[in-house]
Image (cartoon, rainbow, N blue to C red):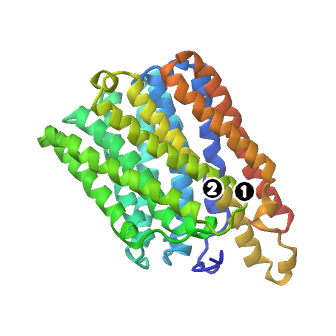
Amino acid sequence: MSLQAGLSFEQAPPFALPLRFFLTAPLFLLAAAGLIVLAPEALASHWTPQALAVAHALTLGFLTMVMLGALLQMLPVVAGSSLPVPRLVAWFSHVPLTLGTVALMAGFLTVASAAFGIGIALLGGGIAVFLAAASISLARAVASVTVAGIRLAVVCLGVTLLLGLALALLRAGWWTPPAVETAIAAHVSFGLLGWVLLLVIGVAYLVVPMFQITPPYPPRLSRWLAGTLFALMLLHAAALLFFQAAAPIVDAGLAGGILAFALATLRLQSRRRRKLPDVTLDYWRLGMASLIACVSVWFAAQFWPAWADSDAYPLLLGVLFIGGFAVSVVSGMLYKIVPFLAWFHLQAQLQARAGSIPTMKDMIAERWTRWQFRLHLAACALLIGATLWAQLAIAAGSVLALSALLLWVNLLSAVRCFSSHGGHFY
């Protein structure tokens, strides 16, 4: 498939708008790694203040930061529907998301009500601005399986935000929401399985065949998977409130859907037409393997109650899903998205001198992307080990810090290449 197929230069927002999100995200990955080094107890229990700060640095500061930047680019270009006032939307979502995530992390670490209050105001306002703009764009978008997946993911982000604000008010001591444990479970479910997984699934329908030169996803899977997973998440929340005995059955359905996506993706990648080495492919394979491992760990816990009740079980699931799956897939896509956008905008701006435009492969040196992947793979292995053997926590955080720093430097090299060839960001 041509890289330009279905894309419109005219509707693309300026390069600077998504780029600010992409360049900020690795810094939060670096901050999460630094917290693990300075406070290894972050990997001792998922309820420690340090663990909560690390989790939100990864999910808000890294994952959501990249995903909002990607949607800012994808909705106008792929869905054929521009966001209203995109420059203002980018400004009033990026800055509050950045500062609000810092404030929320500070709130977890210091238990200061003021920090939670600042975080609530900034994150609530910033994400609400993006949700409103994305909702307008999606309402008039051209229908496709990718757009359908994005719509459901955006709904899940809204639910996650509301639940998160309620829980932050609880942490600040200003309000106690009803059914706190159910609210926490739903916040995690809609945040990770809804916002993160459903968005990855929707985007995968487009980018896996496009960038990895594979056949398309099976039509039946692409039509029904995202909607089925969303319905199961709603049933899961209802089961926790009204009929807890049904929760394991619903969880089994979610596990089956996750497994179906991972296996289908690996099968498509095994059939790709271009057999050249590709670090993005390696990242996706690691992500899919981590999803399969998540399902396996969950399945084992159903037959081993002592394991399910241990501190290591939720930590291991979190490391596999957030670090092994989500951070891997998002990091791999950054190595496609940023060089592609640099090439995309150079071609739009310098069409008269198209022969002088560097290729995507010229934007970032392949050896450095390969080294960064190796560091990330080592960090994932050490993080998994640290959930079982706490002495590995400092080593895991140190390697993750090196990986995050090299990711940031690699993305900056693409920006320098863009600028040196006469590209302008606005």
Q: Residue furthest left?
A: 242
Query: Real-space Cα distance between discs 1 and 2?
Result: 8 Å
The percent position of residue 259, horizontal first and vertical second, equals 40, 51
Q: Amino acid at mark 2?
A: Leu
The percent position of residue 181, horizontal first and vertical second, equals 25, 32
* Residue pictured at 52% horizontal, 56% vertical: 266
Residue 130 in view (yes/no): no
Residue matched to label 2: 281
Give the number of the disc on residue 8: none
Residue 87's place in the image compared with 255, above or below, is below
Q: Amino acid at mark 1?
A: Pro
Along the viewing direction, whichever of 193 and 1 lies nearer the viewer:
1
Picture quadrant where residue 425 is located: bottom right
Q: Of helix, strand and loop, which one carries label 1?
A: loop
Q: Residue furthest bottom?
A: 352
The percent position of residue 395, horizontal first and vertical second, equals 65, 23
* Residue pictured at 58% horizontal, 65% vertical: 271
The percent position of residue 87, horizontal first and vertical second, equals 58, 65
Q: Is residue 92 left or right of residue 229?
A: right
Picture quadrant where residue 178 is located: top left
Picture quadrant where residue 354 is located: bottom right
Q: Quadrant of the C terminus?
A: bottom right
Q: Is residue 139 left or right of residue 107?
A: left
Q: Few, some or many C-alpha atoms within 10 Å of disc 1 (few <14, some 14-19, many ≥20)?
A: few
Q: Are marks 1 and 2 in contact (CB under 8 Å)?
A: yes
Q: Is residue 46 left or right of residue 20?
A: left
Residue matched to label 1: 277
